[in-house]
Amino acid sequence: MKLGIALSGGGIRGIAHAGVLKALEDNKIKIDIIGGCSSGSMVASLYAMGYSPYYIYILFKRYSKDISSINTKPFITGLQNHFFNKNKALTGLKDGEVIEQVYNKLALRKGIKSISDMKMPIVIPTVDITESKEYVFTNQIPIETKDSIQYIKDISVGKAVRASSSFPAVFSPCSVETHAFMDGGVLDNIPVYEVKKQGADKVIAVKFDSDPIDENSNIMDIVMKTIDIMGSKVSEESLEMSDLILNVYTDKVGLLDVKKLDSCYKYGYDCVVQNIDKIKKIVEK
């Protein structure tokens, strides 16, 4: 029996996925196939390359501030430029090169240059904003490819993660040849179906609930909520295909709230502990 896991996007909350993987590891539950979108792709790719869950957590702590350092004033200015200056090229506030560089460096440490070099089956969704179409970066093209989704194997790990993590209005679309890729969460935030197509007999989906918007919400919270609303229907369909849903509580952690990395890692670990009987039941069937 092959067990797959699909990790959703969620900004800084994505480090909770490392906590989930660590708890599964501690309970001797082996993951055979992995998929992840946006911040989920950040964790999934590192795990598929052979980095341990705890070391993934350490890496997030080391690099998260460089990747997510955006303050309020330039963010608002960027939004104004983006939406109200018709002569300005399509752009975001950060180009995402830091993500690409970091992940390519970490991949090379494992002797990996392209996503096709990975041994563990992995899927990373993204969306071509010019085509309004989903693409999937993977090291293994599935036999079942009757739908309209296109697959790409010949791409660096850094470029694939950068593309899937190009959150709208925060990061510029990621250019790959003629494509302009953005956050895969718009169309496939929890890639359960793609994990199943890789041969998984059972799939665990890991997700976060979006936080309510109130008087204390900032513009980043509003953008995140908007993306959650747009992708909610697709996520529902994906979740119906899963064998178990782990809904990780994260106590209103903001999209780029790096101060709460420790808490999020623990939330992920605790979620598995609280649901371990259900997980073992799925695995033992």
Image (tube, rainbow, N blue to C red):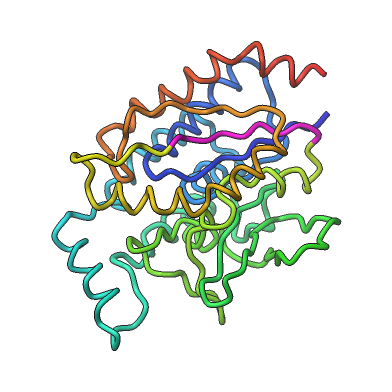
Q: Position of residue 30 (x, y in %)?
A: 69, 26
Seen in the picture, residue 175 relative to 72 is either above or below; the reply is: below
At x 48% / y 59%, what residue is drawn?
183
Q: Position of residue 14 (x, y in %)?
A: 44, 39
Residue extending farthest right: 143
Seen in the picture, residue 78 relative to 285 is either above or below; the reply is: below
Q: Is residue 266 left or right of residue 53?
A: left
Q: Quadrant of residue 146?
A: bottom right
Seen in the picture, residue 170 relative to 269 is either above or below; the reply is: below
At x 62% / y 61%, what residue is drawn?
114
At x 49% / y 54%, what residue is drawn?
230
Residue extending farthest bottom: 87
Q: Position of residue 106 (x, y in %)?
A: 48, 50
Q: Quadrant of residue 73?
A: bottom left
Seen in the picture, residue 224 relative to 59 is either above or below; the reply is: below
Quarter of the rendering occupied by the N terminus: top right
Looking at the picture, tell me which residue is in the foreground, 236 or 262: 236
Quarter of the rendering occupied by the C terminus: top right
Q: Position of residue 214 (x, y in %)?
A: 24, 39
User: Does residue 241 show up magenta in the picture?
Assistant: no
